[in-house]
Image (tube, rainbow, N blue to C red):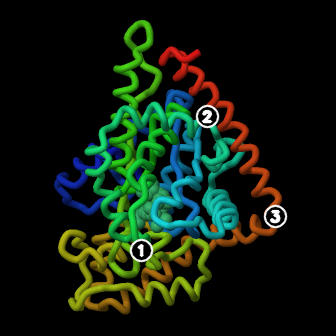
């Protein structure tokens, strides 16, 4: 199947209100063709930054939420940066356990799903000092009240295992603005939970440009734009957002039997007839969407075909679709896993490239701020 469509939040809102008629495959989205064309016309002018926390193996939410969009944009020629947000791990836990292992596993997942380290800069942000230094001026551009209002931070605090909330939990969205702005990214393929953070990055860019304008009235930073996919919030087996650290995910790297077991245990509802109704039947609809994305077909059609088959038939379809779709990715991952030295080299090369870009941006920032 083709990668799912790219959606800006505006395009997604339009998709949600558009008349349905003949149900489109989830890949179809208004605005996608125009954006694809913009990237094709000016690949270098459409720099892409995305990333993940090294807290566990990537899952289907990542794959359909952002990974496919990354690969798609890479294929169109966009310059790609993939940040492994290792400092962000210690927002909701005291110690980042098995950090090196999780970091290498993320790289394996990226490469297996099609991210090309020759074309994409993959790096842990802790290895890029100039990126981290941007945090200081950026923090001065947001108020404490704004930091406290962030809905994603509130949700993460609710799920945190820590007894107290640390300062990084409130300030990491500003650090994430540094992740995005150090390379002057224009496009950020993310899941829905990241939209408040993208707003922070946009605010930081705008305020920095206003406070420290360049001659001619322009600014140092572009306004980054979030790109949502057709599955911006895939639910986990418990019906909450699928997350690496909530024990509800279906990892890309799981074997077929484990995948079957996890899907068998997924929460559904009491109604026998299967339908696609994300608002009223979120758990069933998320499973239907998963099968639809794997098969490249409309979720309404999948639901219709299962009809009165109930949750057991739905889960069988989802399991077969997921395992079939992931089979080549899993095979490629197994090959790559045999050479950990290569994976570490990818990270070293990525860090070197990211450092050069971050140094240049920090030099500009210090100059406009009047630093010596
Ligand atoms: P953690 O539990 O450690 O926070 P996570 O599963 O939430 O892990 P992140 O590393 O925080 O994953 O997120 C990486 C990217 O994947 C972000 O762009 C995020 O929006 C996207 N993403 C994560 N989970 C989902 C999901 N369930 N559906 C769609 N996109 C998702
Ligand atoms: Mg998360």
Observer-nearest of 108 and 15: 108
Dot label at residue 339: 3
Residue bearing mark 2 = 130
- Given this view, does label 2 or label 3 mark the residue nearer the observer? 2
Callout 3: CB less than 8 Å from ligand 1: no
Label 2 to label 3, Cα distance in Å?
Answer: 30 Å
Residue 18: horizontal and vertical position, in percent? 19, 52
Q: Quadrant of residue 53?
A: bottom right
Residue 260: horizontal and vertical position, in percent? 51, 87
- Given this view, does label 2 or label 1 mark the residue nearer the observer? 2
| Image point (51%, 27%), residue name | 45
Q: Is residue 350 left or right of residue 8?
A: right
Residue bearing mark 1 = 291
Are there few (<14), some (14-19), or many (20+) residues within 10 Å of tag 1? many
Observer-nearest of 41 and 142: 142
Are there few (<14), some (14-19), or many (20+) residues within 10 Å of tag 3? few
| Image point (65%, 64%), residue name | 99
| Image point (44%, 12%), residue name | 214
Residue 164: horizontal and vertical position, in percent? 39, 66
Q: Secondary structure at mark 2?
A: helix
Dot label at residue 238: none
């Amino acid at each position: 199947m083709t990668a799912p469509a790219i959606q800006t939040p505006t395009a997604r809102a339009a998709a949600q209100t558009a008349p349905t008629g003949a149900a489109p495959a989830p890949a179809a989205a208004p605005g996608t063709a125009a954006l694809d064309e913009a990237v094709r016309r000016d690949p270098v002018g459409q720099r892409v930054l995305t990333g993940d926390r090294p807290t566990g193996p990537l899952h289907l939410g990542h794959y359909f939420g952002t990974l496919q969009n990354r690969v798609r944009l890479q294929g169109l020629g966009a310059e790609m940066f993939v940040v492994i947000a290792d400092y962000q791990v210690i927002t909701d836990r005291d110690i980042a356990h098995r950090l090196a292992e999780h970091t290498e596993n993320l790289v394996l997942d990226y490469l297996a799903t099609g991210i090309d380290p020759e074309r994409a800069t993959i790096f842990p942000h802790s290895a890029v000092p100039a990126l981290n230094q941007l945090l200081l001026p950026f923090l001065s551009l947001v108020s404490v009240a704004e930091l406290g209002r962030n809905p994603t931070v509130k949700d993460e605090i609710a799920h945190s295992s820590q007894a107290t909330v640390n300062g990084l939990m409130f300030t990491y969205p500003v650090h994430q603005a540094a992740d995005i702005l150090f390379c002057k990214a224009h496009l950020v393929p993310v899941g829905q939970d990241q939209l408040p953070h993208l707003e922070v990055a946009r605010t930081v860019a705008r305020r920095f440009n206003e406070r420290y304008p360049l001659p001619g009235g322009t600014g140092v930073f572009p306004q980054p734009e979030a790109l949502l996919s057709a599955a911006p919030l895939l639910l986990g087996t418990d019906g909450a957002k699928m997350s690496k650290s909530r024990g509800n995910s279906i990892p890309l790297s799981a074997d077929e039997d484990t995948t079957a077991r996890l899907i068998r245990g997924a929460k559904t509802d009491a109604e026998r007839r299967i339908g696609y109704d994300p608002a009223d039947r979120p758990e069933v609809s998320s499973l239907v969407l998963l099968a639809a994305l794997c098969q490249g077909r409309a979720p309404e059609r999948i639901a219709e075909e299962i009809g009165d088959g109930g949750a057991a038939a739905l889960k069988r379809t989802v399991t077969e679709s997921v395992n079939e779709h992931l089979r080549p990715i899993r095979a490629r991952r197994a090959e790559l896993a045999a050479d950990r030295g290569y994976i570490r080299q990818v990270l070293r090369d990525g860090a070197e490239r990211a450092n050069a870009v971050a140094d240049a941006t920090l030099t500009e920032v210090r100059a406009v701020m009047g630093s010596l």
